[in-house]
Image: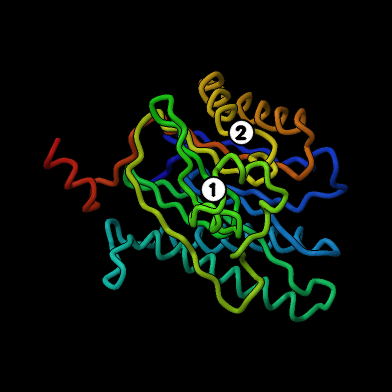
């Protein structure tokens, strides 16, 4: 199924005002309804290389695999869709490529990257992520963070040592506990959910969320709802207006029409109850 006419997609990546190069990478396949964003880390431009490998590898793998999957299939062991399993495998394959590249070049030792992947299919989404790049959903004018940061600070918040306000003001908010490419293996968080017409989805690096608060992000997504290009540019502008201390990347996806796979089990269940 070609989703280009049913899911609007746009994205921007910017160096910001302090860094002299961009370690973020973004990519998409509009026909498949697939978006990928990565925020690299590592010296000697290692982060730039890690994020580029992640985005290119994931996009290439899924562009080959997704069209061949049988509609409505599920994994017997996990209960996740075959699409979710394909995304998880693509991220793990990217992890191996980045780790191997670092082992083969001492300049890039320890390089890694966050990653967040969003896929639309059969009136639903799969979200996969590693690290502290985020995905938000705006539905009915309410913004919801759908990812949980893999950071030391988030763990401290979860255990009650910090409030969310204190965490936002902390100087140690970017110490990630999980990243792609820094070890021989990686754990990937997966989430499946229903997608509705008029949903807006935002993928972003921490260069956005470190600079501007969620309530401002919500206001921008509401106020520029009819123009994704202006929406993305305004998000970047606001991050830079607040200091632009890091590279900042945003990707936006807006559901404009339903996109059921009428041969899939999920659509058949919806039909029964509709």
Q: How is the image coloured?
A: rainbow
- Residue farthest toward the front in the current orientation of the protein: 161
Q: Is residue 135 left or right of residue 78?
A: right
Compared to residue 43, the image places residue 266 above or below, namely above
Q: Nearer the viewer, mark 1 or mark 2?
A: 2
Q: Position of residue 200 (x, y in %)?
A: 47, 33
Rendered residue at 52%/66% (across/down): 90
The residue lying toward the viewer, choosing from 221 and 13, is: 221
Rendered residue at 70%/28% (across/down): 238
Q: Secondary structure at mark 2?
A: loop
Q: Position of residue 192 (x, y in %)?
A: 36, 52
Q: Secondary structure at mark 1?
A: strand
- Residue farthest toward the left in the current orientation of the protein: 272
Compared to residue 22, the image places residue 136 above or below, namely above
Disc assigned to residue 26: none
Compared to residue 192, the image places residue 243 above or below, namely above
Q: Position of residue 159 (x, y in %)?
A: 49, 57
The residue lying toward the viewer, choosing from 81 and 61, is: 81
Q: Position of residue 196 (x, y in %)?
A: 34, 34
Label 1: how many residues lie within 10 Å, few (<14), some (14-19) or many (20+)?
A: many
**Mark 1 or mark 2: whose residue is earlier in sequence:** 1
Rendered residue at 56%/33% (across/down): 214
Label 2: how many residues lie within 10 Å, few (<14), some (14-19) or many (20+)?
A: few
Marks 1/2: CA–CA distance: 23 Å
Where's the C terminus, which quadrant? top left
**Tags 1 and 2 touching, CB below 8 Å:** no
Per the image, the residue denoted by label 1 is 35
Per the image, the residue denoted by label 2 is 213
Compared to residue 79, the image places residue 15 above or below, namely above
Tally of numbered discs: 2
Rendered residue at 49%/37% (across/down): 201
């Amino acid at each position: 199924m070609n989703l280009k006419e049913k899911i609007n997609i746009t994205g921007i990546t910017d160096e910001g005002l302090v860094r002299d190069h961009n370690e973020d990478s973004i990519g998409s396949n509009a026909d498949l309804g697939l978006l990928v964003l990565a925020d690299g880390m590592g010296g000697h431009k290692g982060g730039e290389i890690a994020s580029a490998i992640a985005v290119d590898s994931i996009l290439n793998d899924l562009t080959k695999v997704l069209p061949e999957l049988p509609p409505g299939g599920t994994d017997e062991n996990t209960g996740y869709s075959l699409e979710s399993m394909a995304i998880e495998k693509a991220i793990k394959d990217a992890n191996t490529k980045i780790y191997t590249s670092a082992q083969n070049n001492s300049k890039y030792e320890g390089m890694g990257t966050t990653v967040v992947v969003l896929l639309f299919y059969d009136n639903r989404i799969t979200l996969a992520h590693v690290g502290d790049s985020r995905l938000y959903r705006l539905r009915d004018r309410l913004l919801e963070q759908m990812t949980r940061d893999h950071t030391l600070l988030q763990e401290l918040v979860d255990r009650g040592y910090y409030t969310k306000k204190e965490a936002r003001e902390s100087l140690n908010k970017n110490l990630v506990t999980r990243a792609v490419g820094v070890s021989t293996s990686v754990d990937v968080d997966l989430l499946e959910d229903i997608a509705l017409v008029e949903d807006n989805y935002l993928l972003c690096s921490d260069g956005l969320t470190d600079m501007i608060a969620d309530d401002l992000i919500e206001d921008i997504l509401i106020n520029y709802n009819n123009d994704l290009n202006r929406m993305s540019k305004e998000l970047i502008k606001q991050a830079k207006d607040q200091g632009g201390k890091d590279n900042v990347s945003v990707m936006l996806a807006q559901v404009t029409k339903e996109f059921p796979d009428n041969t899939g089990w999920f659509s058949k269940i919806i039909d029964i109850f509709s």
